[in-house]
Image (cartoon, rainbow, N blue to C red):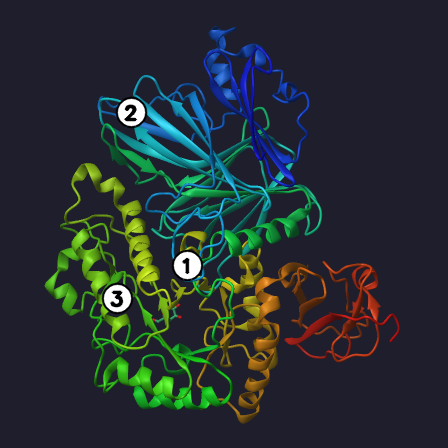
């Protein structure tokens, strides 16, 4: 049983819930006559004996029924499972409201608990699911019960607010997910001002916090800082999860590395404003919370209404960051990614963005496709600039009709011609946006998110559509579906090239304006739900000015996301390291682009560009008719490599051997097949070093007793030798050089 409930373990502990996965336990207790729900333990698997002793005993005499005189001290120290605002817990709380009379205090008391087999879907939101999503891409959840859930209801008796705390235990995956539904069970309306999805109250174990920060063209850079007194937060108020901060944080014990140390990680399945806060309090207790950012959030709940907060994914690893990474990868591959491409090789694509920018027409695209198909590339993706009068990024977003001057015969003619070459055809869309210079804006200036009476802030010369409005959402859907029905389109790159500002809507009433950010995200989810359900054969790739909305919420709709506009292979090492810390390699949009690189001006050998892109979805972002013959000739070899290795890359266990971010001269990571019969590591020598003889690397994840060969070399090694004594990377001179090391099991002991 993954979920157990014990009654009356001590006089204070009225109930105790123990949630077990294969290697972890999560324990909560209902304490005192007043039924406070406390957080007791999260970490390595515990046995079930004498659990009554695991709640810290020092605080027990302070339970209010025995010492109400010091109720405030109890509330400010007790490890709360879901802390409420304003009655004595001064730490960062998870829920606060404003009543009609303007009051904000809340106290949540345990009412009931129910064990549910499987996992209920979260209304309107992306979420992890039980079982494997069916391969036709259908979105049904809970068809196979390989997890179980616990719903705990807590109530504030004064307002009638009920919080339904949902925990799902994915036993085999070592994952626990959490979410919260708030119900107004009272007789008066109130505003929900804050509703976080998860909280962990723990004793400080000299923690450091690992997070991912960045900016455009340098997304998800790993950062690690000590937890000190006060608060550390990671947050986005940009309307999307953002390039700048990522909805992920992990508390790690000092000295935690890839293979050792304790890690408590939280990841948020949400694509809008978020906040993660880590606070070390006066008693060295650490509280980590995660949820929708409370700033500019205010949701009206009338009697009987509910609010569903998004899901947080919790992973504990007692074996360092590497184990955490592999847990997330397996979990997302199985329980978050859906659709027909879920477990499949994706077509090798060529995208014309860096090849032509806006300067293309049917003839040029067919020319690129013709050459590309000859080289083994399988799909042409037409990027920005095919619609309205869009010849630069100043106009036409919203006018989703084909520009017949550029593309005579329209999308159908082009797609058919591409198909005749034996290639698939894909298209770029930016459905959430509106250019002031567009027919759509001229007809509906009130459809943009804006503060009435104030000129809106332009970003990339565009505004954001007010997807909280039903008419705007329906029109947007109609435009998308019309495009997708007009030709044989088998791939969509869904872009979002600006963040939200000027939060205002022409029709939302004042008392609901605080709902705009979240309603916007729900609108995006609704559009992508329709797209994945009504066009299940389309491969959807999300994108936001590069990797600005690379988050688990978007991953629920698209099995891959464009990682970054920065396609320089060396910068990509850091971006892909940060991304692969949580996301499977099958999700990382990665292409070989032209050099000098368009963003950095750096020139990296074509071979290295190919090796780095092979760790992701793999594709090209250049004009194959214009690159040198020498580079062109390497493409068939690269596409063959993709076919040879992609199953391993998509399905294997990921190991990081060395990080260029840390050592400043080389990078090495790779994947090991689950049965350990094969592995592929990518070694990149960023900077050559003079008179330096040893480049030995110790692989990880192999079977110590197995015999292995390195493809293309003589000799047989044991896994033990390759992992402990290491393997010498030889004859690699120069900067930006790389090598793929393919390790294959062999029967022979001698070689
Ligand atoms: C964004 C994307 C790019 C490209 C452009 C087109 O920046 O990240 O890949 O599609 O938009 O405008």
Identity of the residue drawn at 61% across and 80% down = 607
Q: Earlier in the sequence, mark 1 or mark 2?
A: 2
| Residue bearing the label numbered 3 | 480
Assign a secondary structure to mark 3.
helix
Q: Residue furthest right?
A: 750
Residue 728 placement, left or right of 240:
right
Q: Earlier in the sequence, mark 3 or mark 1?
A: 3
Assign a secondary structure to mark 2.
loop
Q: Is residue 721 above or below residue 123?
A: below
Give whichever of 433, 501 is nearer the camera.
433
Identity of the residue drawn at 40% across and 24% down = 154
Residue 68 placement, left or right of 648:
left
* Total numbered badges shown on the rendered structure: 3
| Residue bearing the label numbered 2 | 185
Asked whether mark 1 and ligand 1 are closer than 8 Å, the reply comes as: no
Could you classify mark 2 by the number of other residues whose Cα lies within 10 Å: few (under 14), some (14-19), or many (20 or more)?
Answer: many
Q: Nearer the viewer, mark 1 or mark 2?
A: 2
Residue 624 placement, left or right of 1:
left
Q: CA distance from mark 1 to mark 2?
A: 38 Å
| Residue bearing the label numbered 1 | 548
């Amino acid at each position: 049983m993954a979920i157990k409930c014990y009654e009356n373990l001590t006089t204070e502990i009225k109930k105790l819930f123990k949630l077990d996965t294969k290697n972890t336990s999560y324990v909560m207790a209902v304490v005192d006559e007043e039924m406070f729900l406390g957080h007791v333990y999260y970490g390595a698997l515990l046995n079930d004996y004498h659990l009554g002793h695991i709640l810290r005993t020092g605080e027990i005499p302070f339970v209010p029924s025995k010492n109400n005189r010091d109720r405030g001290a109890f509330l400010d120290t007790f490890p709360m499972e879901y802390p409420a605002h304003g009655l004595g817990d001064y730490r960062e709380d998870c829920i606060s409201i404003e009543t009609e009379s303007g009051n904000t205090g809340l106290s949540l008391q345990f009412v009931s608990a129910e064990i549910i087999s499987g996992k209920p879907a979260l209304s309107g939101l992306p979420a992890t699911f039980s079982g494997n999503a069916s391969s036709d891409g259908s979105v049904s959840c809970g068809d196979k019960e390989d997890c179980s859930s616990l719903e705990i209801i807590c109530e504030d008796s004064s307002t009638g607010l009920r919080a339904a705390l949902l925990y799902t235990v994915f036993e085999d995956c070592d994952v626990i997910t959490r979410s919260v539904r708030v119900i107004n069970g009272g007789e008066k309306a109130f505003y929900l001002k804050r509703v976080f999805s998860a909280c962990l109250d723990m004793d400080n174990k000299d923690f450091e916090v690992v997070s991912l920060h960045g900016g455009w063209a340098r997304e998800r850079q790993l950062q690690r800082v000590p937890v000190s007194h006060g608060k550390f937060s990671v947050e986005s108020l940009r309307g999307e999860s953002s390039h700048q901060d990522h909805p992920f944080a992990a508390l790690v014990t000092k000295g935690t590395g890839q293979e050792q140390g304790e890690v408590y990680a939280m990841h948020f399945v949400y694509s809008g404003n978020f906040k993660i806060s880590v606070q070390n309090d006066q008693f060295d207790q650490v509280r980590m919370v995660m949820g929708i950012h409370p700033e500019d959030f205010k949701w009206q709940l009338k009697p009987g209404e509910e609010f569903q907060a998004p899901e947080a994914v919790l992973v504990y690893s007692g074996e360092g960051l590497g184990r955490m990474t592999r847990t997330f990868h397996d979990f997302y591959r199985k329980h978050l990614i859906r659709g027909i491409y879920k477990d499949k090789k994706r077509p090798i694509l060529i995208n014309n963005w860096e090849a032509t920018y806006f300067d293309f027409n049917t003839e040029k695209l067919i020319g690129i496709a013709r050459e590309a198909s000859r080289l083994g590339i399988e799909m042409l993706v037409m990027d920005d600039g095919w619609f309205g009068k869009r010849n630069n990024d100043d106009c036409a977003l919203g006018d989703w009709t084909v520009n017949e001057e550029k593309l005579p015969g329209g999308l159908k003619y082009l797609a058919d011609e591409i198909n005749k070459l034996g290639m698939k055809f894909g298209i770029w869309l930016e459905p959430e946006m509106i250019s002031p210079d567009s027919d759509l804006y001229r007809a509906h200036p009130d459809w943009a998110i804006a503060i009435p009476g104030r000129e809106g802030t332009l970003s990339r010369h565009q505004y954001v559509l007010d997807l909280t409005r039903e008419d705007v959402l329906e029109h947007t859907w109609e435009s998308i579906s019309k495009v997708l029905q007009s030709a044989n389109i088998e791939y969509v790159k869904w872009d979002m090239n600006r963040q939200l500002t000027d939060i205002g809507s022409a029709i939302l009433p004042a008392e609901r304006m605080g709902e705009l950010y979240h309603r916007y995200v729900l609108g995006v989810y609704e559009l992508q739900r329709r797209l994945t359900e009504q066009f299940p054969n389309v491969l959807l790739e999300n994108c936001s000015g590069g990797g600005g909305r690379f988050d688990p919420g978007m991953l629920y709709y698209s099995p891959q996301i464009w990682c970054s506009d920065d396609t320089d292979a060396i910068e990509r090492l850091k971006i892909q390291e940060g991304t692969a810390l949580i996301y499977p390699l099958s999700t990382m949009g990665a292409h070989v682009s032209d050099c000098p690189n368009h963003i950095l001006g750096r020139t990296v050998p074509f071979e290295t560009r190919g090796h780095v892109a092979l760790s992701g979805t793999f594709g090209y972002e250049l004009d194959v008719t214009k690159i040198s013959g020498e580079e062109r000739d390497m493409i068939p070899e690269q596409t063959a490599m993709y076919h040879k290795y992609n199953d391993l890359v998509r399905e294997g266990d990921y190991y990081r051997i060395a990080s260029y971010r840390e050592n400043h001269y080389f990078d090495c990571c790779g994947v090991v097949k689950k049965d350990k019969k094969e592995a592929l590591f990518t070694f990149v020598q960023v900077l050559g070093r003079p008179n330096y003889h040893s480049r030995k690397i110790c692989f990880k994840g192999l079977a110590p007793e197995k015999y292995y060969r390195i493809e293309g070399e003589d000799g047989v090694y044991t896994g033990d030798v390759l992992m402990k004594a290491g393997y010498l990377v030889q004859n690699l001179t120069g900067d930006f050089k790389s090598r793929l090391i393919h390790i294959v099991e062999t029967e022979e002991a001698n070689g």
